[in-house]
Image (cartoon, grey):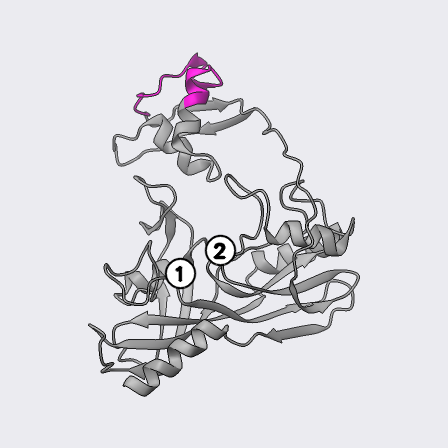
Amino acid sequence: MTSIIFHNTDNEKIRLDSYLSEQFEDMSRSRIQGLIKDGMITVNGKKAKTGYNLVDGDVIDTNIPEPEEISIKAEDIPIDIVYEDDDVIVVNKPKDMVVHPANGHYSGTLVNALMYHCKDSLSGINGELRPGIVHRIDKDTTGLIIACKNDKAHNSIAEQLAVHSIDREYIALCYGNIKENSGTVNAPLARNKTDRKLISVCREDEGKHAVTHYTVLERYPKVQGMSMPLTLVKCRLETGRTHQIRVHMSHIGHPLAGDEAYGIKKDPLNGHGQYLHAAVLGFIHPSTGEKLRFEAPLPDYFEKTLNRLRRLS
């Protein structure tokens, strides 16, 4: 059982189910509502009601049952291994591959492939659904991701992620002409209150600290057949929140090309998902203490699009 003391100094009307869906990011609002109806959640010792508006000082007790584990099968799926030893494995993930099993994707994921390749050598900290996984990238994002083969390595990499010491650089194609050569987006992020599949910039006290540094690599100011210019940027993550680069660049008026969630309407570059590639990954090796750094070239579809933009500009 988990107890939460609700604080609301602004006297805003905040529903119990909405508030809890923010506290438990892996749970949908409908799932929270089901738990309330089943009597799994109380407020001030009394059975809660779905439409209850929280009051400052309310004590919320949640008794959330453990999710049923689903047996995940190893699958002989080819993966592009950039580096591997007894502790870690670095993979260049292709487009359209989900990192770990979730609703609607219980096969064909990177985890299924890693289970086949690594056999029983994957860390177990994240449970059966996410063995070895310490961070992730979106389905349509390509590039470098690290998985851990034992719990010692997992704890080491997780700690480096927590203190933001891992080097992560992405290449992104954005709409609009970014005039400055470099910049920083410092804007907290949280789940969108109306659509939990999306992330939104929010007030500092409502979300998680998020910082993205970007540098312009190329500009395509006048592309024939395109409604607006485009800019190729390198983004360095200081923090690693869900959809961070996609939301941050959209927030400053330069959404990623091909991004159906945060991009522009009638995007002529739709069809490949967002143009985002995890190009650089650097970390301290969990056992040797050596600083490792890996790079992955842009995927063919990304490179072909850039070559076309260069010809037409």
Name the residue beneath numbered marker 1: 273
Give the side of residue 277 with respect to residue 215, left or right: right
Query: Does the magenta run of residues contain 37?
Result: yes
In the rendered structure, which amino acid carries the disc numbered 2? Lys
Kindly identify which numbered label has been placed on residue 232: none
Q: Residue furthest top?
A: 46
Kindly identify which numbered label has been placed on residue 139: 2
Q: Residue furthest left?
A: 227
How many residues crowd around disc 1 within 10 Å: few (fewer than 14), some, or many (20 or more)? some
Q: Is residue 95 visible?
A: yes
Give the side of residue 72 with respect to residue 202, left or right: right
What is the x, y in percent for residue 184? 37, 70
Query: Residue 59, relative to residue 137: is it above or below?
Result: above
Task: Classify residue 305 by image quadrant.
Answer: bottom left
Range of magenta residues:
34-54
In the rendered structure, which amino acid carries the disc numbered 1? Gly
Dot 1 and dot 2 residues touching (CB under 8 Å): yes
